[in-house]
Image (tube, grey):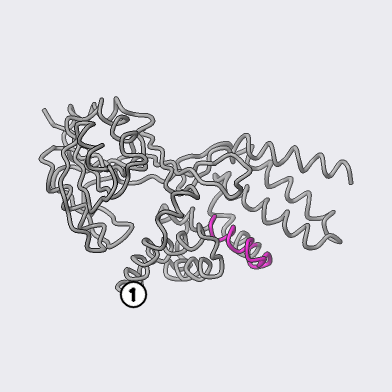
Amino acid sequence: MPRIALVMIARDEARCIVRCLRSVRPWVDDMIVLDTGSTDQTIALAQAEGAQVHHFTWINDFAAARNAALACSDADWNLILDADETLDEGGPLIAALRSQQPDFIGRIDVRSSYTTDSQQPAQAASSWLPRVLPKGVRYEGRVHEQPVSTLPRQDLAVTVGHDGYMPAQMLSKGSRNQSLLKLAVAERPQDAYLHYQLGKDEEVHDRFDTAWQAYARSLQLLGPQARRDPPWRHDLILRSLFTLKAKGQLDEAIHLAETEMPNWPDSPDFYFVLGDVLLDLAMAQPDQAGDILPMVENAWRQCLSIGENPALEGAVHGRGSHLARHNLDLLLGTMAAI
């Protein structure tokens, strides 16, 4: 019978590693943690939860660390999680892999909590990531590493929560990822995915000028022939629109939205962000607000018409339902008072 192992790399994750291990332990046969130099209680906590702890000297290369961790596993299936993640839904599906041959790579829904306003509740954005790997599959990439395999990908109804993008966690990470991303981009300057990831790192630190530079380069490298592929292009477009809005480049944001609209008829997130852009345009041009506000209303009504679509990369839960309805109610109340 095929065996299943959790495989994790970790460093100074005492805050959250117990939470992660306990969420996974009922569904796997082994838990393997590769420590890359912890100075807190990470190792002791992992061992207390029943994990096998191995050690690795960090060399500024996530793929190297992932591969070293995978080398410690002899399981047929390897579930890859980070310490700041938890297995929230789909544990029985992970356990059911014991009755399946390891002949595909499983993608799971990693929902990252984030906030753009400390006074508002956190939201969660989906990323469908290849995290269930058959024995023998290995990674490449200094940062935002990806498994290399010709095996087919299969989406699994498994949900993982991730809080590593929350402000306190981002502060603790400092500039680690940014340094690695810049090294990776220097090594592979034609890689659109790396520029997209560099833009994300700049954006979450509110460095919108450099974020847009990275996103624009990613779009350029993908070329005008790209429509909905690769899957992360959806998130790239959403982030580009948000970043242009944050920079006050509303005309450029509108132009990008007009160009992209035919590609995303099923994306409530696209119309949600478009509504935000148009609302800023109405505030910037109050003499034209009477013409622009109905377009804002139409954008958010379109969100509700489409409904939720969590299969799209970067989808934020609620933009096809309660978040759009909340914005629409506020807008209609404001328009009625004008």
Indicate the position of residue 255 as horizontal and vertical percent values: 64, 65
Magenta region, mostly helix, strand or loop? helix
Q: Secondary structure under badge 1?
A: helix
Taking the image as shown, residue 322 lies to the left or right of residue 93, namely right
Indicate the position of residue 13 as horizontal and vertical percent values: 32, 45
Q: Residue at x 68, y 50 (%)?
A: 275
Asked whether residue 252 is drawn in magenta, I would say: yes
Indicate the position of residue 272 as horizontal and vertical percent values: 62, 47
Furthest residue to the right?
A: 338
Asked whether residue 325 is drawn in magenta, I would say: no
Q: Nearer the viewer, residue 152 or 215?
A: 215
Looking at the rendering, which quadrant does residue 252 occupy? bottom right
Q: Residue at x 54, y 44 (%)?
A: 266
Q: Nearer the viewer, residue 140 or 86?
A: 86
Name the residue that disc number 1 marks.
186
Indicate the position of residue 224 as horizontal and vertical percent values: 48, 67
Q: Nearer the viewer, residue 138 or 142?
A: 142
Q: Residue at x 61, y 59 (%)?
A: 257
Q: Residue at x 30, y 46 (%)?
A: 130
Q: Nearer the viewer, residue 87 or 305?
A: 87
Segment colored magenta: 238-253
